[in-house]
Image: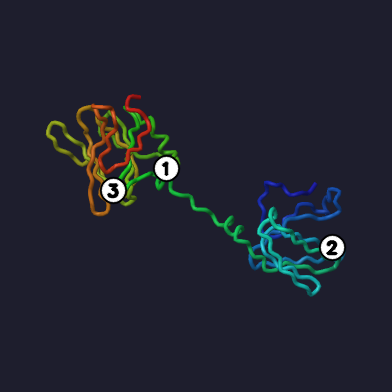
């Protein structure tokens, strides 16, 4: 039995559905789907067979026996059909197939928006940050799947404590991580990057002292902040210029 698999990839040109030379399935005819692009011409002529060419959608010109008819059908569900029926031995052709606007729109790939563009930043915010968990980034997988297509983000360990996700708003931002010393009240450069990529930090082994400073430079200005959990109410503090996207409780 010769018929077209509905899951098979269709090609430009004639795609046979029923081939009478192999098995006509009791129809005594050939049936196929003709796919054409703008500028294509398809010619059919058979001395022993008549032909019916039914327009599903698009704009074509039917030509046969010196005649010519323009046909346009945006789709096959809401518009009347056009069909050319030509007798045996008649040369029939459909030149200059022009796709409808709907077909052109369907054929044009829709760009996939960057998930990071959905973050609800407000004016002046230079980064987003989220608390991920204590001693393990338990909520990291959600953010990696939602915003980074499952890509694993780098983790920078300052100390064994809380974990935070940091997402610079500017992909070209310069980011520096500094390790804070509680005794000397000084800070030492721990890590630097210039590509504005997101990352995770493990920090704050002590509840009373944030041991990391994140410095983000974008558009000629630099913002420093230290993420921490408030001892007053357990809220996540990410700095005045940051967007807090924390999902989980700090008590979990």
Which mark's residue is nearer the viewer, 3 or 2?
Answer: 3
Q: Residue at x 78, y 68 (%)?
A: 92
- Of the two numbered discs 3 and 1 on the same chain, state the one appearing first in sequence: 3
**From what the image shows, is residue 220 above or below residue 192?**
below
| Residue marked by disc 3 | 124
- Of the two numbered discs 1 and 2 on the same chain, state the one appearing first in sequence: 2
Which mark's residue is nearer the viewer, 3 or 1?
Answer: 3
**Label 1: which secondary element:** loop
Q: Nearer the viewer, residue 170 or 177?
A: 170
* Residue 190 seen from this side: no
**From what the image shows, is residue 41 above or below residue 211?**
below
**Label 3: which secondary element:** loop
Q: What is the x, y in percent for residue 159?
A: 25, 31
Q: Residues within 10 Å of mark 3 (few under 14, many from 20)?
A: few
- Of the two numbered discs 3 and 2 on the same chain, state the one appearing first in sequence: 2
Left or right of 108? Residue 93 is: right
| Residue marked by disc 2 | 50
As drawn, the label of residue 148 is: 1
Q: What is the x, y in percent for residue 179?
A: 21, 37
Residue 134 placement: quadrant: top left
Residue 31 placement: quadrant: bottom right
Q: What is the x, y in percent for residue 4?
A: 73, 49
* Residue 49 seen from this side: yes
Gap between marks 3 and 1, in whole Å?
23 Å
Left or right of 152? Residue 107 is: right
As drawn, the label of residue 223 is: none
Gap between marks 1 and 2, in whole Å?
57 Å
**From what the image shows, is residue 192 above or below residue 107?**
above
């Amino acid at each position: 039995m010769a018929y077209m698999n509905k899951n098979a990839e269709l090609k430009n040109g004639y795609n046979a559905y029923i081939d009478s030379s192999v098995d006509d399935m009791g129809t005594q005819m050939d049936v196929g789907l003709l796919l054409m692009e703008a500028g294509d011409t398809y010619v059919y002529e058979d001395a022993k067979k008549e032909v019916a060419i039914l327009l599903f959608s698009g704009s074509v010109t039917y030509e046969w026996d010196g005649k010519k008819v323009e046909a346009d059908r945006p789709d096959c569900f809401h518009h009347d059909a056009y069909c050319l029926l030509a007798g045996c031995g008649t040369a029939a052709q459909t030149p200059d197939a022009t796709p409808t606007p709907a077909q052109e729109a369907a054929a044009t790939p829709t760009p996939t928006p960057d998930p990071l563009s959905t973050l609800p930043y407000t004016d002046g915010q230079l980064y987003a940050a989220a608390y991920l968990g204590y001693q393990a980034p338990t909520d990291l997988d959600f953010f990696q799947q939602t915003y980074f297509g499952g890509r694993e983000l780098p983790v920078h360990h300052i100390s064994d404590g809380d974990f935070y996700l940091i997402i610079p708003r500017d992909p070209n931002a310069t980011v520096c991580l500094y390790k804070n010393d509680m005794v000397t009240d000084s800070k030492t450069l721990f890590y630097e990057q210039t590509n504005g990529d997101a990352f995770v930090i493990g920090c704050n082994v002590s509840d009373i002292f944030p041991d990391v400073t994140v410095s983000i430079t974008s558009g000629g200005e630099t913002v420093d902040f230290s993420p921490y959990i408030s001892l007053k109410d357990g809220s996540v503090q990410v700095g005045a210029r940051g967007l807090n996207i924390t999902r989980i409780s700090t008590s979990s």
